[in-house]
Amino acid sequence: MIRSAEELDKLVREAMKNTEGNTFPINSKVKRVAASAMIQFTADEIEQMEDSFKVLFCAEGGIARISKYQVGKRKPTYEIRYCRHGINISVTDKCLKTAKALFIQETQQLNKT
């Protein structure tokens, strides 16, 4: 389980070592490396989430899936996803803290639509 950006960075570095020399058909000069793990939210972050979602989320341990994509030399992109019980939330940002904030914001919008 991933609790910090450093742990996810370590996973990505290991993935990059395993894919050295591999290229992708889109552009032979671009390598795309991805690492995926589970991310756990703190009690303060969960408290900010929408109430009905919070109950489901806490029942499952406050865990969502996080992926880190590294394309070429650009800054990595973080994607946080939750897809259970008919709820599909996916947010992406280049900063992990911002991605978590966007995820919380998306949970607050669930009952407004």
Image (cartoon, grey):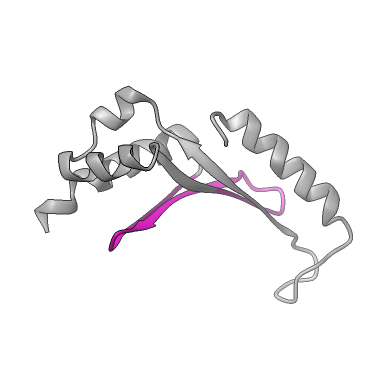
User: Is 7 placed left or right of 100 in the picture?
Assistant: right
Furthest-bottom residue in this view: 25
Residue under the point 58% across and 45% down? 37
In percent of width and height, residue 10 lies at: 72, 35
Look at the picture and state if 37 lies above or below 19: above
Residue under the point 40% across and 37% down? 61
Residue 91 is inside the magenta segment: yes
Residue under the point 40% across and 32% down? 41
Look at the picture and state if 112 lies above or below 28: above
User: Is 30 placed left or right of 102 in the picture?
Assistant: right
Furthest-top residue in this view: 44
Residue 52 is inside the magenta segment: no
Q: In which quarter of the image is residue 76?
A: top right
Q: Quadrant of residue 63?
A: top left
User: Is 85 placed left or right of 14 in the picture?
Assistant: left
Return the residue nearer the eye: 36 or 93. Answer: 36
Residue under the point 70% across and 44% down? 12
- The mark tally for this picture is 0
Return the residue nearer the eye: 45 or 27. Answer: 45
In percent of width and height, residue 60 lies at: 37, 43
Q: What stretch is highlighted in magenta?
A: 67-93
Q: Quadrant of residue 56?
A: top left
Q: Can residue 95 be seen in this view?
A: no
Return the residue nearer the eye: 44 or 19. Answer: 44
Q: Looking at the magenta stretch, what is its main secondary structure?
A: strand
Q: Quadrant of the C terminus?
A: bottom left
